[in-house]
Each structure stands twice: as C-alpha cells, then as structure tokens.
Amino acid sequence: MMRVFDDQTLLVATHNAGKLEEITDLLKDFGISVIGAAEKGLPEPEETGTTFVENARLKAHAASMATGLPALADDSGIEIDALDGAPGVYTADWAETPSGRDFVKAMTDTNDKLEAISAPTPRTARFCCTFVLAWPDGHDEVFEGRMEGQVVWPMRGDQGHGYDPIFQPDGYDITFGEMDRWEKNRISHRADAFRKLKTIFKNG
C-alpha cells in the first residue's frame, strides 16, 4: 500500500536552482516547507545507475539518510527510438565537455548519429522523468512520467534547456524550445510524474 506523506518538510535532492524552483512551485498548494540539497550542504552523489529509477533512488536515499528528512529526487532524460533508446539515462553525459555541459554540441552530435544511420522520419522519441520519494527508514515510492514526441532538425527556439530545441511533443507543431515555459511545465514528462506523485500528499 502506498505510503501517505504527512511530514511538514520535504528535502528536494537537487543542486539545480531551476529544478528546485519548479518543484517548489508544484508543491506550493500543499503547505509543505521545501528545502534544497545545497541549503543542507549535501554533496552531489555520483550517478552510477543504469536506469532513471536507479539514479533517482540513489539521490533520494543518500539525501534522506544524511539529513533524517524525507527526500525527493528525480532523474530524467530523452530516449530516441532510432538510437535504441539513447541517450536515455546518459542524456546529460552526452553534453559534457572539458569546459562544462554544451547541449548545442550534444544536439548536433545526436542529429549526426541519426543522419549517419539514415534514421527514417518521424524520429520518435520521448522525455522521461522518474521521481523517487524516500524516507529515513529506507522506504520509498516511485512515480514515472513521459512525454511522447519526435526529434527534429534544425534546432528551434531558445526557451527551456537541454534537448528542448529539438524535441517536438505529440500534438504540437512547435518544439519545447519554442514553447512558453508554463505551457511546457503543464504538459511535460515532469508534470506527468508529478500528477502521480501528488496523490500521496494528504491534500493531494
């Protein structure tokens, strides 16, 4: 049976200020105090998992054990069918360079890989998000969300982040990179996962 969240404080196990802001906004109606990992001085654990669930679990349990608070973590990325689901859990890794993450390079490399194998269009893909909420006693609950669509080229739009400029969600003729931030937040993979997550809050 799914555990109900009835604590007053939730630790969000991320050092990403934008992600913390987004999750805080999603939780604003639940009367829960939200704090980030940086506020607690927590290190970022190495993401050694090979699935979104494994990485989210690793981050959530590490944060919960370190603080004694229930902790929420997420892992997300894009899966492209013609690349056998890559980059998937390694989405951010594809953007790594000696001087930091470069998603323009990552998107260009991704398109080059698709062109090299003459991948047919539409090049179906999906964004995936997995939330794990962990408690200090070791219990956790898992919530998975998806947004189906296709990858397109060239890049379009300067909104959002990551692979947003080449991802066109089903039912739209614009990319996430061209979409208003709040519209994207309403339909995204993270919103899908959050709709499932919020059912465990007392007033969800």
Image (cartoon, rainbow, N blue to C red):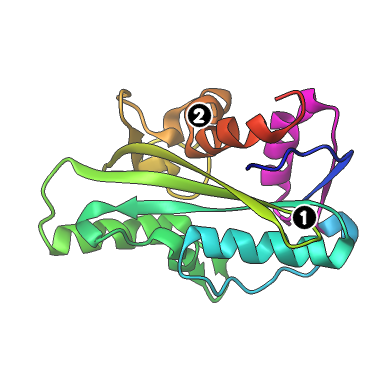
> Which residue is at a point 84% across and 34% down the rendered structure image?
32
Is 39 within the magenta? Answer: no
Mark 2 touching mark 1, by CB under 8 A? no
Is 156 situated left or right of 194 in this image? Answer: left
Rendered location of residue 48, percent (x, y): 55, 75
Q: Secondary structure at mark 1?
A: loop
Region in magenta: 12-37
Give the percent coordinates (x, y) of residue 103. Answer: 46, 56
Q: 21 above or below 48?
A: above
Residue 107 seen by the camera? yes
Query: Residue 184 got which mark?
Result: 2
Q: In the image, is 110 to the left or to the right of 69?
A: left
Query: Which mark, by number, is residue 14?
Result: none
Front disc: 2 or 1: 1
Helix, strand or loop status at disc 2: helix
Whole-percent x and y of residue 141? 63, 49
Q: Residue at x 76, y 23 (%)?
A: 203
Three-letter residue code for mark 1? Trp
Q: Looking at the figure, which quarter contains the N terminus?
A: top right
Q: Earlier in the sequence, mark 2 or mark 1?
A: 1
Extreme-front residue of the structure = 1
Viewer-proximal residue among 102 and 135 = 135
Q: Is 137 displayed left or right of 22 in the figure?
A: right
Give the spatial CA distance, label 2 vs label 1.
Answer: 30 Å
Q: Amino acid at mark 2?
A: Lys
Residue 192 image offset from top left, x and y in percent: 51, 33
Q: Give the residue displayed 36% in from the left and 55% down from the top.
A: 107
Tell me which corner region of the image, top left, top right, bottom left or bottom right, holds residue 121.
top left
Q: Is residue 20 magenta?
A: yes
Which residue bears the numbered disc 1?
Answer: 135
* Displayed quadrant of residue 136: bottom right
181 left or right of 83 in image: right
